[in-house]
Image: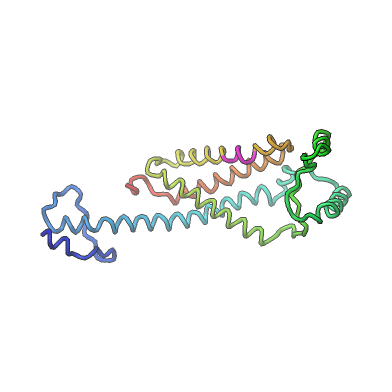
Amino acid sequence: MAAWWISRPAPDCTAERLPAIPDRKPSSDLYFLARQDQPCRAGHKKGMAMIRLVIGSILGGLAQFFVGFIFWGTPLTRLAFTIAGPGENAALQNALAQTLTPTGTGTYFIPWPDTPGGTTLLGKGPIATIHFTTGGSAAVDPGALLGGLIVSILTAFLIGLALHGIAARVGSLGERLRVALLISIAAAIYILIGQPLYNHYGWGYWIYLFVSQVAGFIAASFVIARWFLPRPSAIQ
């Protein structure tokens, strides 16, 4: 029996399966065939779980993208911005073109405080952080929307990997969403709410951005956790 078992070829995962007998003592060929077949079944389960996760990531990314559209593609977006008038817009755009175009696209901290004069101007105010681009863009840019959708799908996939990693220990939908919510809030607080604290920005835009980001994370997490994560019993 031992010589036959050692010389036997590796199991074929496409062959007909024999039921595993975990509680039976190794006293027959049937036991060895069943035990040898278990890695094939485990690999099949992992492959199916990954396929489900990829599909869930696409749908979760679409859900996150839709939430982002509600916050940033509708009149609600006016809650995030302080809007200057037409004359001020034109004057500021001309000033930006004249002063920043020579140094090019980039992020500018105005005034720069590395000199005594800059330090004085910084203390006097006003101050600004300017995300400047030398060229223009369409009000609705299809390329930017496509790039944003890809980012949403990638984000949902990473969320799905994290939730899949705890799925064996965290079984209920509510518990999984609570984990996702707490992690999303923690990350958004550090990344977004820290900005007005450190850089003396106005609070309105960053609070609105914080709410929209957390809502998008939760939308993606709900889709994945509700329909595309295995039950704990299926993982073991």
Q: How many marks?
A: 0
Vertical side of 2 occupied by 169: above or below: above
Percent position of residue 103, x then y: 78, 54
Query: Magenta residues, as a range?
Result: 187-192
Give residue 137's quadrant in the image: bottom right
Q: Where does the image place residue 5, in percent across and percent down from the top left? A: 16, 60
* Foreground residue among 29 and 181: 29
Percent position of residue 182, x then y: 52, 37
Q: Nearer the viewer, residue 232 or 95?
A: 95
Classify the position of the N terminus by image quarter: bottom left
Measuring 54% from the left and 44% from the top, which residue is drawn there? Answer: 218
188 part of magenta stretch = yes
Residue 68 part of the magenta segment: no
Q: In screen coordinates, is 175 left or right of 69? A: left
Way the structure is coloured = rainbow
The residue positioned 34% from the left and 55% from the top of the image is 45
Residue at x 68%, y 40% (from the top left corner): 206
Q: Is residue 13 left or right of residue 95?
A: left
Instruction: Name the outermost residue toward the front.
Output: 115
Q: Position of residue 155 (x, y in %)?
A: 54, 51
Q: Nearer the viewer, residue 134 or 231?
A: 134
Q: Is residue 19 left or right of residue 230?
A: left
Position of residue 103 relative to residue 78, above or below, is below
**What main secondary structure does the magenta stretch of the protein show?**
helix
